[in-house]
Image (cartoon, rainbow, N blue to C red):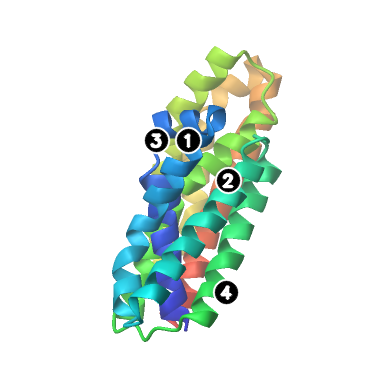
Amino acid sequence: MYAYYGVLLCCHLVGDFYLQGDKLAKNKQMKVGGVIIHSFVYVLPFLPLIAMLDRMIGEAVLLASVLFVSHFLIDIFSRRYQTFSAFLTDQVMHLVVLLVVARLYPLQIQLPAFWIGIAFSMLFIFKPSSIAVSKLLASCAVTSEADEENALHAGRKIGYLERLIILLLCLFGSVSACTLVIAAKTLVRYSEFSNDNNFREVFLVGTLMSITLALIGYGGARLLMG
C-alpha cells in the first residue's frame, strides 16, 4: 500500500509542479482555460499507472476523469487565494483524493520501496518545497514586489542545495552535520542582519521552513521505504 501511494505521490508532484511552468501557473490564475490545461497535463503522469490497473476501459476512463475533475475543482477554489495557508489546503485536498484513489483502485507495485522513497524525497524537496517557502516568505516580506522577486529568485537555488544537503545527510545518518549547513548559511548572510531588520525575520522563517521541508522529505522517504 505504501509503495503504491508513494508512486501516486510522485505522479502528483510531477503533474502539479514539474509539468507546470511559470507561464501556465500565471495563466491559470487569470483564465479558467489555464486551469483546464493544467488539469489535463496533471493527469498525464498517472496514465501508466492507470494502464497497469488492468481494468475495463470504461473504469480507466472514469479514474482519469476523477483525477481531472477533482484537480480542476480544487484548483478553481484555491486559485482565488495566493496565501501559504491556501497552498497548504490545496495540497492536503489533493492528497486526500489520492488516498481515496489508492483505496478504490488498489495496485501491487513491483518497484523497490527504497527507490520509491528516494524518488519522492527528491521530487518533494526541490520545486514543491521552493514554492511553499516562497509563499510563506511572501506573507512576511515588506519589500517591494521587484525586490521580493529578486530575493526569492536568488534564494531559490540556495534553498535547493540546502534541502538536498540536509536530506542526504539524514539519509546517511549524519543528522548532527546539518548544523554546519545552517551555520555556513548564516555566516555568509551575517552582514545583512545588522542592515535590515526585516531580513532577519525573513531569513529565520525561510531557513526554518526549508529545514522542516527537508526533514518532511526525509520522513516521507523513510516511511515509504518501510
- Asked if the residue at tag 4 contacts the one at tag 2, i.e. Cβ–Cβ closer than 8 Å, the answer is no
Disc 2 is placed on an element classified as helix
Q: Position of residue 106 (x, y in %)?
A: 45, 84
Pick the residue in front: 200 or 118.
118
Mark 4 or mark 2, which is nearer the start of the sequence?
2
Q: Position of residue 59 (x, y in %)?
A: 42, 76
Q: Where 196 sits versus 68, above or below?
A: above
Q: Amino acid at mark 3?
A: Lys
Label 2, label 1: how many angstroms apart (C-alpha)?
A: 12 Å
Read off the residue under disc 3: 157
Would you call the spot at circle 4 few (<14 residues within 10 Å), some (14-19), or many (20 or more)?
few
Pick the residue in front: 63 or 15.
63
Picture quadrant where residue 50 is located = bottom left
Would you call the spot at circle 2 few (<14 residues within 10 Å), some (14-19), or many (20 or more)?
many
Which quadrant holds the C terminus? bottom left
Q: Amino acid at mark 2?
A: Asp
| Residue 173 is at least partly visible in this image | no
Residue 75, numbered circle: 2
Read off the residue under disc 1: 33
Disc 1 is placed on an element classified as helix
Q: Position of residue 4 (x, y in %)?
A: 42, 78
Q: Amino acid at mark 4?
A: Val
Judge depth for marks 3 and 2 and give the one in front.
Answer: 2
| Residue 6 is at least partly visible in this image | yes
Mark 2 or mark 3, which is nearer the start of the sequence?
2
Q: Where 210 sits versus 117, above or below?
A: above
Read off the residue under disc 4: 100
- Residue under the image location 56 percent in, 57 percent down: 70
Label 3, label 2: how many angstroms apart (C-alpha)?
A: 27 Å
Mark 4 or mark 1, which is nearer the start of the sequence?
1
